[in-house]
């Protein structure tokens, strides 16, 4: 019998994740899996459980939680000789990775799709010595989004990020960044740099409409000016899927990128606080196999 490990974050989905454990277990058992349930209690638990699943040659690992839980789970797959197939039940604030793979955002529907025979190999990103799932942002705005509390995420959802973003825009803080990619160097003042693996970032599915989960590329944006008035036109471009053509945005794709600054600059990685600059980013093409819904 095949082995499946379910890794569940009990604080996800306004603390409703536990309500779906039994349904997930029944679907997986019906698909021929013997199921082990692991519940996270703190930072790093999901990675540790996933490492255990790799070491014990599980066939499937299912992450029930938000992008943070998924980020931790997938970091347990880094450079492992045996990597289980990944299943996803999204229960976070924005669930960007699930959106990009068209995995249902309704937990009941996502659970049913765990029995799908269809899988897709997807790219992963590497930030220094760890993986990221969806996006890395650097700059004053990225740092402010990392301060959103778990309580606000559960209570306000995406509005929690919007609230912090507006506060930061009002301060109009930018940093001098040096960004190197494919032999080219850009240096200037910017409040925000984004490197995305998929088309969905922060719940906006048109940030990088040309991005595919298996194209082997980082889709990068340097925002040169984001004062409160200019942010309106940037937001409109974002909603229309035309951010790359905004006059104050530089867009490029690359397989490797480095970002540094002479100032202390924070990063945000998959919706959580990341390491300060400098950082090195690269892609790992088609690194993980993910269960996706049938057509």
Image (cartoon, helix red, strand yellow):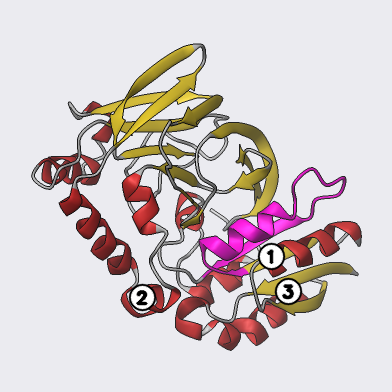
Q: Which residue is mark 3?
A: 28
- Residue 123 lies left or right of residue 55; in this view the side is left
- Is residue 87 within the magenta segment? yes
Q: Which residue is mark 2?
A: 152
Q: Residue at x 81, y 72 (%)?
A: 33
**Which element type, helix, strand or loop, lies under badge 1?**
loop
Residues at badges 2 and 1 in contact (C-beta under 8 Å)? Answer: no
| Quadrant in the rendering for residue 19 | bottom right
From where the camera sits, is residue 205 visible?
A: no
Position in image of residue 215 (x %, y %)? 54, 30
Q: Residue at x 58, y 30 (%)?
A: 216
In the image, is residue 292 above or below residue 278? below
6 and 135: which one is in front?
Answer: 135
The N terminus lies in quadrant? bottom right
Q: Circle 1: is it few (<14), some (14-19), or many (20+) Cα within 10 Å?
A: some
Q: Which residue is mark 1?
A: 44
Q: Residue at x 16, y 53 (%)?
A: 170
| Quadrant in the rendering for residue 44 | bottom right
The label shown at residue 27 is none
Which comes sooner in the sequence, label 1 or label 3? 3
Q: Which residues are magenta?
A: 64-90
From where the camera sits, is residue 214 visible?
A: yes
| Quadrant in the rendering for residue 193 | top left
């Amino acid at each position: 019998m095949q082995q499946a490990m379910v890794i569940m974050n009990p604080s996800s989905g306004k603390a409703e994740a536990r309500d779906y454990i039994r349904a997930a277990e029944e679907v997986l058992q019906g698909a021929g899996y013997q199921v082990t349930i692991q519940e996270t209690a703190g930072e790093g638990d999901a990675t540790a459980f996933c490492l255990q699943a790799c070491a014990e040659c599980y066939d499937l690992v299912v992450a029930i939680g938000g992008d943070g839980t998924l980020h931790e789970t997938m970091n347990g797959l880094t450079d492992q000789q045996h990597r289980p197939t990944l299943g996803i039940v999204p229960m976070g604030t924005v669930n960007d990775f699930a959106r990009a793979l068209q995995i249902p955002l309704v937990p009941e529907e996502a659970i049913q799709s765990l029995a799908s025979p269809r899988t897709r190999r997807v790219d992963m990103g590497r930030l220094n010595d760890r993986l990221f799932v969806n996006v890395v942002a650097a700059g004053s705005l990225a740092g402010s989004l990392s301060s959103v509390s778990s309580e606000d995420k559960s209570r306000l959802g995406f509005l929690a990020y919007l609230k912090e973003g507006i506060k930061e825009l009002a301060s109009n803080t930018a940093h001098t960044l040096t960004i190197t990619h494919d032999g080219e160097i850009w240096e200037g003042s910017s409040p925000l740099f984004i490197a995305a693996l998929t088309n969905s970032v922060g719940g906006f599915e048109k940030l990088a409409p040309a991005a595919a989960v298996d194209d082997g590329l980082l889709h990068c944006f340097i925002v040169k000016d984001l004062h409160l008035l200019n942010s309106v036109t940037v937001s409109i471009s974002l909603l229309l899927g035309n951010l790359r053509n905004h006059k104050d945005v530089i867009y490029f794709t690359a397989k490797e990128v480095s970002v540094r600054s002479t100032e202390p600059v924070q990063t945000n990685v998959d919706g959580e606080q990341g390491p300060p600059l400098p950082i090195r980013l690269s892609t790992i093409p088609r690194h993980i196999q993910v269960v996706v819904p049938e057509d």
